[in-house]
Each structure stands twice: as structure tokens, then as C-alpha cells.
Amino acid sequence: VTPTDWALIFGNSALSALLLRAGAEKLVKTKVAATALDELFPRVRSDLTGIVRLAAVLEAIAAIAVATPELRLPAQPFVGALGLAFLVLGMLGKARGSRQPCGCLGASSARPLGTTNVLMGLALLTVVLLNIEIVRPGNATAVAVSTSFLTVIISVVWLFWTSRQRIRLVIGNVRKETEPES
Amino acid sequence: MMVVGAIALLLLTAAIVVLYAMMGELAARVPDPDGNSANHVAPLADFTRGAAPTIYPTGLASLAHQARMALVVLSPICTTCDKVAAELANYDPDEIGLPFGVVVSTSTRETGEEFVERHTLHRFPYVVDEGATWITGSLGVKMSPSALVFENGVLTEAFTFSNVQAILGRIVKVRQGVS
């Protein structure tokens, strides 16, 4: 595995973990992101939950595709479109003084559309450029397998991190139950 | 073969992430028995943003033309609302920092009036909204306790909350963000 392969592994696994989580959270909690879009486009009268749901499905598909050798390159236009969408929405949110939580990562995303989304969009576009630049990795199988494993590790650590309070609570309860009576 | 195994593992992780999101959504709907969510304030997703009621109930008429004001929606049948109403009893309406009214959403007028009396909510501008006709019909709000922020008569923000201090902190924070 060459240094450029490692760049591809780290870039794609971070991208895949981010899109996987964003897609899953938005799929379940559609309303928060739809409300943020409603605020950004007040003239659009129709319900935007369908668009949010579609974006969530595209994010999840792109997350799996970038880790699959045959789909990695064909997926890049979709990832690029998502990156561009994040960038434009972030810029619009900043310009129009958006105040609704963006719901990009579900209900836990308290920040409105703005700088974070612009940075996220730029990060996605950077990874797209990296993928286009490295058409043939040194060891395609190793890159695909490592990307999948690293995505799994990042996703699991991220889930544990966001659930740390609940985990502490559960561990505390278990300890209480196992304490011997004096 | 290894690639297939890795992709399968990735799909399994995707399923776990979706399951986690679903569990989080369910957990958010269950009150914390230890009261650890006492400072919980979350944006309300279901409300009519930009609604500008043309008719205000008589009890809230004094708030209709305020540049900025807030309404708190409470229901006598919700435990958290009871707690919030008891906390409100400790607040002086003039010290809250912005014009502030209470909407008691209830099925019968008697239950609503009893709730207002029990928690001395009549110190605030208030209305007993029988059948939630005004709050749901004019503002699309179906949840309590919730706090609605109006600017120049337009509903701009809505939150769910479980603690008066926390929601006041949030509303003041939002106001500072605007200026």
C-alpha cells in the first residue's frame, strides 16, 4: 500500500462514515432538516421532507459506494453534487442569517446552516478530487478492504462517543446492582 | 472474497447506525425519570413558521402588538407542564425580560381554569384554549410544553423544553444572536 493509497483510505473512510451517519439520522429525523430548508426558501410552499429523505438515501448510497472498488469512481459525481449542495446551502444560510438548526446530523445538530456546512462541502469536494486524481490505486483490494474496516471503526467510535452519557449511566446502574450489601 | 466480506461488514454497520438513530428518536420521546434532562431545550419541528395570527384571544390581546414576545403552551394533563407551571409561579411577570403569555391547551374550560388557578398563572396574560383550536388552528402547534417566539406578530421560532430557566436562557440567547 503506497502513501497515496493511504490518503485514499483515510479520505474515503472519513467521508463514508460522515455520509452514513448523516443519511441515517436524516432518514429518521427528517423534520429538523426540512424546517431549516423551509426557513431558507420561504417561497417554496410544498413540503420539503421528501427532498430531505431523498438526500438522506443518496448520502447512504454514496457512503457504501465509495468503499466498493467498482463503484468508487462512478459514485464521485454524486458525492461531488452532495459536497456542492452542502457548500451552497451553507453559504445561503450564512448570507440569509439562518437560525433554525440544520438537522444535518439529525436532531443533535443544533447549529444553523452556515460555516460548518461550507467547510463540510469543501471537505467532500477535496475527497472527490483525491479520488479522481488516484484512478488506479497501488493495491485496489487492500484500499477497498481498509476503507471498509476504517469506516466501521470510525462509525462505532463515533456512536460510542455520542452515547457516552448513556453508557456511563448504564455502567453506573450495573455497578449499583452488583454492589454487595453491607 | 475479502472485499465482499468488508462490504458486508460495512452494510451491517450502516444498519446499526440507522438502528441507533431510531433508538435516539425513541429515547428523545421518553422523559428522563432522574430529571437529568431538566435543562432540555430542543427546537420544535412541527409548527407553522411565519404564521401571523390576525385574531388573538382576549387574554393575550396585550401581547399582539409587541415587537418581541413569547407564549408558553401548557396542558393540564402533561406531567412536565405541571412542573413548568409550578416553576412559573416563582417568576414575576415583569422580571422575565420579554412580554410573556401562557396558553393552556385543554379539553374543557373548567380543567384549564383550575390549572391556571392552582399555579397562579393569571398573573401572566393567559388564555384557556379549549380543544387547542387557536394554538393548533392558527399556529400549527400540537405539543406541550412548548415555547413560541413572535417577532412583530410573526411566529419565528418554537421550542420544546422542560425547565423555565433553560427556555428563558435560550430565548435571550437567540435574541442576542439577532442583534
Image: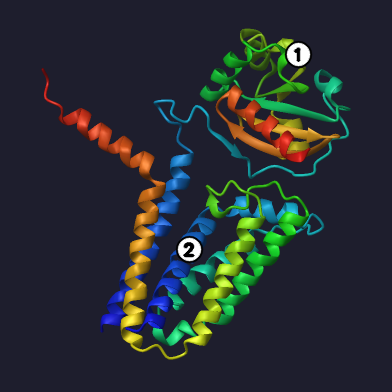
* Mark 2 element type: helix
The chain that hosts pointer 2 is A
Contact (Cβ within 8 Å) of mark 1 with mark 2: no
| Secondary element type, mark 1 | helix
Q: Who is closer to the viewer here, A16 or B45?
A: A16
Q: Is A129 positioned to the left or the right of B60 in the image?
A: left
Q: Up-down: is B8 above or below B161? A: below
Closer to us: A60 or B108? A60
Q: As displayed, is residue B168 above or below residue A161?
A: above
- Quadrant in which the C terminus of chain A is drawn: top left
User: Circle 2 sits on which residue?
Assistant: A18
Q: Which residue is mark 1?
A: B94
Q: Could you tell me if residue A54 is visible in this image?
A: no
User: Which residue is most to the front?
Assistant: A3
Res A116 visible = yes
> Measured from the top left, where is residue B165 in percent x and y?
60, 23
Answer few, some or many: residues within 10 Å of disc 1's Cα (few below 14, many 20 plus, some between 14 and 19): few
> Chain ID for label 1?
B
Question: Residue, x 49% and y 66% (percent of image)?
Answer: A19
Pick whichever, A109 or B178, lies toward us. Answer: B178
Query: Mark 1 is on which residue type?
Result: Asp
